[in-house]
Amino acid sequence: MFRPAGALSTVHEITALQYALEKAGTRPIVVVEQPKLANGKTSDIAVVTNLTASRALVAKAIGINDHRSAAPIYAKKTGTPIKPKIVSDAPVQEIVIDDLTKLPALKQHTFDPGPYLTAAHATTYDPDTGVDNTAIQRGWIKGPRRMSWYPYPASHNTRNLRKFWTRGEKCPVVFWIGHHPAVLMGTQAKLGYPESHWSACGGLIGEPLRIAPSKTFGDKIMVPADAEIVIEGYAPKDVLEADGPFGEYTGYSGPQVAAPVVDITCITMRKGALYHDYGSGLTDMLVPDNMAMEGKVYSIAKAVAPALTNVYVPAQGRRFHAYLQFSKPGPGEVRDALTAALAYRRLKLAIGLDDDIDMFDDSEVLFALATRVQWSRDSFSIDGLSGSLLDPSTAAGAKTLSKMAIDATLPLPPFAGVPSPVPPRSKVPDAAMDAARKVLSGADMAGWPTL
Amino acid sequence: MTIEHIPAGASWEKSGNASWGQCPKCKNWFHLGPEILKRPEVKLHCPHCAHEFHQNDAPRLIKAG
């Protein structure tokens, strides 16, 4: 954990620190105890960011010792839901404040128009069934009691909003900020509609999530009792205002959009609350969502390809690339799995790999692509699949994407018990490698060329 | 003020998807999504100077597609 000495501004400076850490190749949790607001005042609410920048730390937070095995375990845990527990003593409701601008929300990137809630979990409910939905959705703080809210058009929260508005009603919504990383990961579970995230959170933490009725909406919208901050309000019918541009997960600034606004009814927080921020477009935001994607893609592809052993969605590919690993796949099985994976909305490239490839090492993946692929034979593309239109490479007006799959696995053995018809990989004996590591163990490598 | 459209090329040629508007006050440019351009009643907000204006008042609007 890194606690920078002195004050840091919520305008660009904290995000710049995250970029600098990422460039340096290190991913500590960052706690800024003296965040300086845009008006020059120092907030007494500390900012926590980079909480989820490290795969290793996130995996540990959800009880997984090795992040490399996260996909099947995450899929299993979120697929084993535990119902939440309703409590009346919610620490998050200990203090009531009346002004959103007191929160140390960050203005992260140069094109962002103002301070944004980036780790706000928006909870709405389906007015037909009463089932709630939770998703991380941004909010631009526009004043003491007003903010914009941008539920992505394809999101379940947008469905709920539209249902309320079609009825001629304003949409109730609660934003909660800050919780144990396992709970944050539970809200990233990719569920059907309508389906509550509270039970998926319970599956990840291994016990019922404690929830309490919100101050404004009672048991219509529950809030996590142990969150840090809760903001409650209504999105008035058909009121849209400019929102953005906003630095997105793609690494580009997303365009200005027409977004709903929220009139705030109540803000509560726990004593000594921390304000949680996700560095948008940084590994801090990519890692938890990508790990949740790994669980979902694993479930989808495993259903058609039992030889699938693992899935990795690398932050280097934003949310667009997935590596699928196989052990002794049968004929057609890799392509079946890759085709299934491409159906997942956010992906646009799926690569199939053998289990001798360390898919968490990009140089190994490039090795497989370089030596195991004949492009016309082993790659295929499918146009017209659903995807993220924030992808800057899409054509204007496009509603779907062009996606690609690459089978970078070796051919199967022609008969049982014989080798595959490919040359063996070059290697040296394990004992020689151990000896080499011993030779290097005491060497001072500082200053040695790395390229 | 009319919206200027970027001419479409052949399907095999690269094309972008970002539309841009120019602020009447500070003259800086910022990018706009397709949906907000379909809603002239929603005021645009310049992220550079915080000026709010209707798209009809933008000196230039360049629309992709």
Image: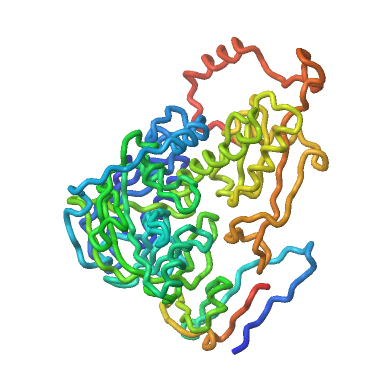
> Which residue is found at the position 61% from the left and 35% from the top?
A303
Q: Is residue A287 above or below residue A409?
A: below
Q: Residue at x 69, y 43 (%)?
A: A339
Residue A13, located in which quarter of the rendered image?
bottom left
Q: Is residue A138 visible?
A: no
Residue A209 sits above or below residue A161 on the image:
above
Give the quarter of the figure containing the C terminus of chain A.
top right
Q: Position of residue A378 (x, y in %)?
A: 78, 38
**Horizontal relation, residue A80 to residue A332: left or right:** left
Image position of A221 (left or right of A305): left
- Name of the residue lying farthest toward the top: A431
Quarter of the figure with the N terminus of chain A: top left
Which of the 4 image quadrants contains residue A2?
top left
Indicate the position of residue A183 as horizontal and vertical percent values: 36, 43
Q: Is residue A164 above or below residue B61?
A: above
Q: Is residue A8 visible?
A: yes
Count of numbered labels shown in the rendering: 0
In percent of width and height, residue A135 lies at 42, 54
**Looking at the image, is A114 positioned above or below residue A432?**
below
Q: Nearer the viewer, residue A39 or A104?
A: A104
x%, y% of residue A296?
54, 41
Question: Residue drawn 78% across and 27% down?
Answer: A411
